[in-house]
Amino acid sequence: MQSRRGPAWLAWLATDVIAVLVFCAVGRRSHAEGLSITGVASTAWPFLAGTVTGWLASRGWRRPTAVVPTGVVVWLCTVVVGMLLRKASSAGVAASFVVVASSVTAALLLGWRAGVGLRQRRRSDV
């Protein structure tokens, strides 16, 4: 489903947004922080800004489910922009957090794309 017409790509953008929100909610939960909407939003906003930056940089609406280049660019922007904005807003950017955030967001943002690609390949083999 790599449509260039209509709003179909919005569902894939929403998938990335949900992935980032899941990352932030699970992180907050693992640190016994609240799961209020405002709490998750305060943790998520830098990463969501990075996700949107990645979509714009990769022109994600063209090939939203492609691991390369879309997924990689979205993932890298999510982490890099997210960490820069966290640093600028005096939030934590410890090296261990950068490693965990990079790993988990890679699994989430690249993983769903890999799953879609695998499903598409299996359908074309039939």
Image (cartoon, helix red, strand yellow):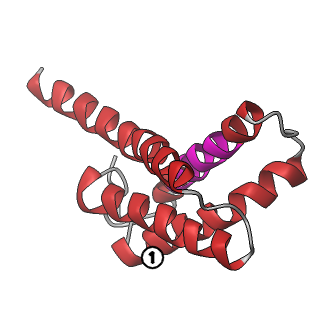
Between residues 53 and 125, which one lies in front from this camera angle? 53
x%, y% of residue 24? 67, 46
Does 77 appear in magenta? no
Residue 14 visible, this orientation: yes
Please tell me whether residue 34 is drawn above or below residue 74 in the rendered image.
Answer: above
| Residue most extreme to the top | 126
Between residues 28 and 68, which one lies in front from this camera angle? 28
> Label 1 belongs to which residue?
56
Which residue is drawn at the image coordinates 50% and 44% (left, top)?
A: 100
x%, y% of residue 20? 59, 49
Please tell me whether residue 99 is drawn above or below residue 4 in the rendered image.
Answer: above
31 to the left or right of 104? right
Residue 63 visible, this orientation: no
Please tell me whether residue 18 is drawn above or below residue 44 in the rendered image.
Answer: above
Between residues 33 and 2, which one lies in front from this camera angle? 33
Q: Classify mark 1: residues with Cα within 10 Å, few (<14), some (14-19) or many (20+).
A: some
Image: magenta residue range: 13-24
Helix, strand or loop status at disc 1? helix
Which residue is drawn at the image coordinates 28% and 51% (left, top)?
A: 67
x%, y% of residue 115? 33, 32
Decide whether the magenta segment is chiefly helix, strand or loop: helix
x%, y% of residue 68? 23, 57
Which residue is drawn at the image coordinates 45% and 51% (left, top)?
A: 102
Q: Tell me the amino acid under the disc marked 1.
A: Leu
